[in-house]
Amino acid sequence: SITNNQYRPSYHFRPPKNWINDPNGPMFYNGIYHLFYQYNPKGAVWGNIIWAHALSIDLVNWKIIEPAIYPTKSFDINGCWSGSSTILPGNKPAILYTGIDPHNRQVQNVAFPTNLSDPYLTKWYKPDYNPVMAPIDGINASSFRDPTTAWMGSDGQWRTVVGSKIHLLGKAILYKSKDFVKWKRASHPLHSVHNIGMWECPDFFPVLLKGRRGLDTSVNGAGVKHVFKVSLDMTRYEYYTVGKYYEHKDRYVPDRTSVDQKTGLRYDYGNFYASKTFYDGGKKRRILCGWSNESDSQTDDIAKGWAGIQTIPRRLWLAKNGRQVVQWPVEEIESLRGKRTKMKGLKLKQGSRLEVKGVKASQADVEVVFKVSGLERAEPFDHSWLSDPEKLCTQKRADVPGNVGPFGLLVLASNNLTEYTAVFFRVFKYRSRYVTLMCSDATRSSLRPEVYKPAFGGFVDSQIQKNGKISLRCLIDHSVVESFGENGRTCITSRVYPIVLSTKSKVGLYAFNHGLETVKIIKLKAWDMKNGNVLDESSYV
Ligand code: FRU
């Protein structure tokens, strides 16, 4: 039976009980990381949504304090939905969020800390002049939400975008303001796309062409590109493009190499939604926070008494090729690494499986570099597969042999492999090039029939044709498997609910190869992970 504990993550953030969804308004302010998140104080299903508030100095250990924003006024009486934070001149934080009004219309509000000398920014006030953006002049009042972190243009005006749609036209409605109080809608959206549906949780920020350093959200100019991300309600996946922001035209234009629709780039090809980035001025990096929903049944969520986790915050930067972003778990997470196991120079022949011993496989961090041989014998790639890597992973699962791959890791495995989650690569040949597929296949993850067990997949911009090498990192935390292929070029998060976690028997971790060609483990390191602390000092009942 489901208890509170067997699937509860130990180093991913979530409060002790109840439902959570989107990360809201993450920021670094005077040495403290603030994470707000959508929270139902009354149960493990979505509803009664408020902004809960957690603090951290290392993004690993958290202290939950009282909720920051909850319904008190007519402009948010039916809910306090997602939004963001912006640090205004004079080092003054501000929140922009969506309130649900008495007519269930979505409106945008501002809130400010009550007392700037309180280092925790515990209390927030909502001025009576709210809402500052209302669904008028043709805006659909039930599709108007999730304002982004504001950025300042060279004219000294603030800008923010709000996610919206008109019929199936997804829109990022642009607003401008001189004082953060009076906001004026621009004559056209910052960006819009046909036949796509509602754009939830847009995010818009600059990235440097070169290097991993992050930029404050207001930076623009030479050497800078922009990333535009939406959470697509229609597919429940997120998509982003890399492009250029023309400030004087109030437009964002994706590069030609960036596909602007359902087959476009994703931060994460798995269970990852409503994400948001922020600029960490302390370590000069941009950090991505995201929500990973449960994929067991709602009955199980209620039995557990909790639902939803925040993924490990990821540092994010533009890849060298300028066409995609790269993500990597923040370095602070490595402080949780405990006992280590190492392997190197081992060969995985066709059909072989190698146990990674001496690591607590239900709570581990694994890094491995593989080297393939016989690339020229890779199977041919059918061009039509490009549009749907998830389908390809569903058809070619870990137990379907190929020529080069599948090879990778079997995580959260039961003793006799009646349960396992396979995270792996498969290489195909397309003309004179190679196509690398990465899958996180939960099909066999649990013997429990009621659980949703998709085989997620994404293509990897790998260097495999140069030297045959490809890397994989997996953060395993009970029901969470967060995987990073090729140093963060392709990421996939799966939620899995193996029965083995609720038994006394050992949980297994293996490297495997079901491809014809031998694969070498150049090196593999695995660490036990310690628990992160989540101290709950919230007084909300
Ligand atoms: C995304 C979302 C947002 C909304 C919030 C409500 O998951 O639907 O669009 O503001 O959640 O909780």
Image (cartoon, grey):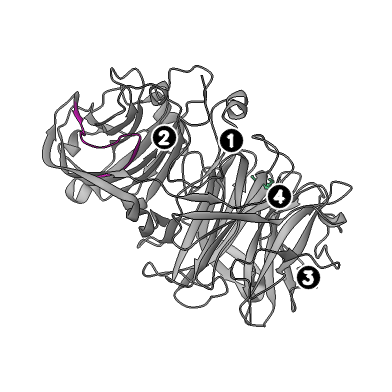
- Read off the residue under disc 1: 306
Look at mark 2 in the image and give the residue it sits on: 478
Residue wearing tag 3:
183
Q: Earlier in the sequence, mark 2 or mark 1?
A: 1
Marker disc for residue 89: none
Tell me the CA gap for discs 2 and 1. Answer: 14 Å
**Disc 4/disc 2 C-alpha distance (Å):** 27 Å
Tell me whether circle 3 and circle 1 mark residues in contact (CB < 8 Å).
Answer: no
The nearer-to-camera label among 3 and 1 is 1
**Apparent side of residue 414 relative to residue 450 in the rendered image (left or right):** left
Calculate the distance from the C-alpha at mark 3 to the C-alpha at mark 4. Answer: 24 Å
Distance from label 3 to label 1 (Cα)?
A: 38 Å
Left or right placement of residue 238 versus residue 43 in this view: left
User: Which residues lie in the magenta part?
Assistant: 353-368
User: What's the residue type where badge 4 is placed?
Assistant: Ile
Q: Is residue 167 above or below residue 189?
A: above
Q: Is 356 part of what is drawn in magenta?
A: yes
Instruction: Give the mark nearest the N terminus, 3 or 1.
Output: 3
Please name which of the two marks, 3 or 4, marks the residue nearer to the observer.
4
Q: Secondary structure at mark 3?
A: strand
Rendered residue at 84%/46% (across/down): 104
- Looking at the picture, tell me which residue is in the foreground, 369 or 235: 369
Residue 133 placed where, x, y %? 80, 63
What whole-number distance in Å separates the C-alpha atoms at marks 1 and 4?
16 Å
